[in-house]
Amino acid sequence: MNIIKKTALTFLIASSLGVISSSAFAEESTNISETIAYVEQALADVNKSDFSAAILHLKSARLSSELITSNEATVKQANANVIQAQILSKSGDVQKSAEELNKALVLYKTL
């Protein structure tokens, strides 16, 4: 009887760990998708020269990128590009800001 209880308990623990790890992966994918969406919205706003809306999207992108835990070097570089685009947006430089956002999009999409 003890063997059956131990086997059932082991199976229960193993299956719950599998569920936890798959939900963590799904959450990571959601954070990446949200960040990409914010950067794409910011890029569209920059191309329309709507810098105030672009800056709001860039702030949201930076906040959601902080929740991404995979490949920290790539996330750090993409976040640096977003920050640079934010600075360029504040100065009104459409072309350079769009270039930085495109670089960030490429990096985020590799995740």
Image (cartoon, helix red, strand yellow):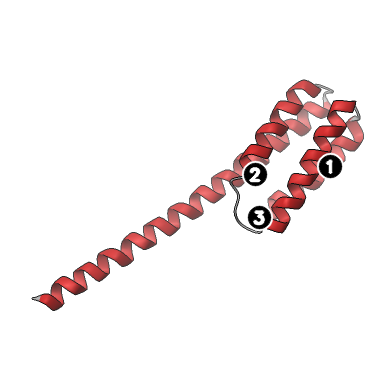
When the figure is inspected, residue 63 is found, relative to residue 69, above or below; the finding is above
| Distance Cα–Cα, label 3 vs label 1 | 17 Å
When the figure is inspected, residue 67 is found, relative to residue 15, above or below; the finding is above
Q: Residue at x 87, y 41 (%)?
A: 99
Q: Amino acid at mark 1?
A: Glu
Q: Between label 2 and label 1, give the one nearer the viewer.
A: 2
SS at circle 1: helix
Task: Give coordinates of residue 106: x percent, y percent.
Answer: 76, 50
Going from N to C along the chain, the mark reached first, 2 or 1, is: 2
When the figure is inspected, residue 65 is found, relative to residue 71, above or below; the finding is above
SS at circle 3: loop
Q: Which residue, given by chain and number where applicable, does mark 3 sit on?
A: 111
* Residue 63 placement, left or right of 106: left
Q: Which residue, given by chain and number where applicable, does mark 1 sit on?
A: 100
User: Is the residue under label 1 in contact with that under label 2 (CB below 8 Å)?
Assistant: no
The quarter of the rendered structure image containing the C terminus is bottom right
On residue 65, which mark appears? 2
